[in-house]
């Protein structure tokens, strides 16, 4: 059973940084992709980016480029979301997700429909 466990959220001041983790388990091999999403109160869940564990590539939405970085560890069991220069509008619950299909990130990597497995989310609050 595929399981994703997001962690690392918390309270941070504007301008600060935070690194979220997504622990990944249950895939038959180590060839998978992980997407990051977030959902602020009263808004739809939106995509941030996606990384392929096999090194096919890392992809970001335009809004995430420059401040957010997605990476994975050598053991391929944890994916990270490094967030810098945080703003109050980055306040949201952050989720990691994975498609069932192995390989590179989905073509529509920022679409919720492309993902089959979801972590429980971790709250990030950025104070002004």
Image (cartoon, rainbow, N blue to C red):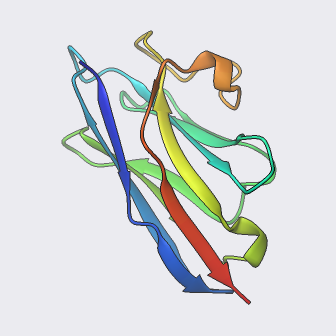
Most foreground residue, 21 or 64: 21
Tell me if residue 127 comes above or below residue 95 in the rendering. Answer: below
Q: For the C terminus, give its image quadrant.
A: bottom right
Residue at 43% x, 43% y: name it: 120
Q: Is residue 113 visible?
A: yes
Q: Is residue 84 visible?
A: no
Residue 30: image location, x then y, percent: 25, 24
Report which quarter residue 15 is drawn in.
bottom right
Q: Horizontal and vertical percent for residue 29?
A: 21, 17
Q: Is residue 102 left or right of residue 93?
A: left
State the residue lying farthest toward the front.
42
32 relative to 86, above or below: above
Residue 55 placement (x, y as % from top left)? 41, 31
Residue drawn at the location 21% of the way across and 23% of the way down: 26
Total numbered circles: 0
Residue at image position (25%, 38%) is 76
What residue do we see at 55% from left, 23% from top? 105
Q: Give the left or right position of residue 22, taking residue 81 as reference.
A: left
Q: Which quadrant holds the N terminus?
A: top left
- Residue 116 point in image, percent of width and height: 49, 18
Figure check: 42 above or below 108: below
Residue 36: image quadrant is top right
């Amino acid at each position: 059973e595929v399981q994703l466990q997001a962690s690392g959220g918390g309270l941070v001041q504007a301008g600060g940084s935070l690194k979220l983790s997504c622990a990944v388990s249950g895939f038959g091999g180590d060839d998978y992709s992980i997407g990051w999403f977030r959902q602020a109160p009263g808004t739809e869940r939106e995509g941030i980016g996606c990384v392929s564990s096999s090194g096919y590539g890392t992809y970001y939405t335009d809004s995430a480029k420059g401040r957010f970085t997605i990476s994975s560890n050598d053991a391929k069991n944890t994916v990270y979301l490094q967030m810098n220069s945080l703003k109050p509008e980055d306040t949201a619950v952050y989720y990691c997700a994975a498609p069932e299909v192995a390989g590179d990130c989905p073509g529509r990597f920022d679409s919720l429909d492309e993902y089959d497995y979801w972590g429980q989310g971790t709250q990030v609050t950025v104070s002004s």
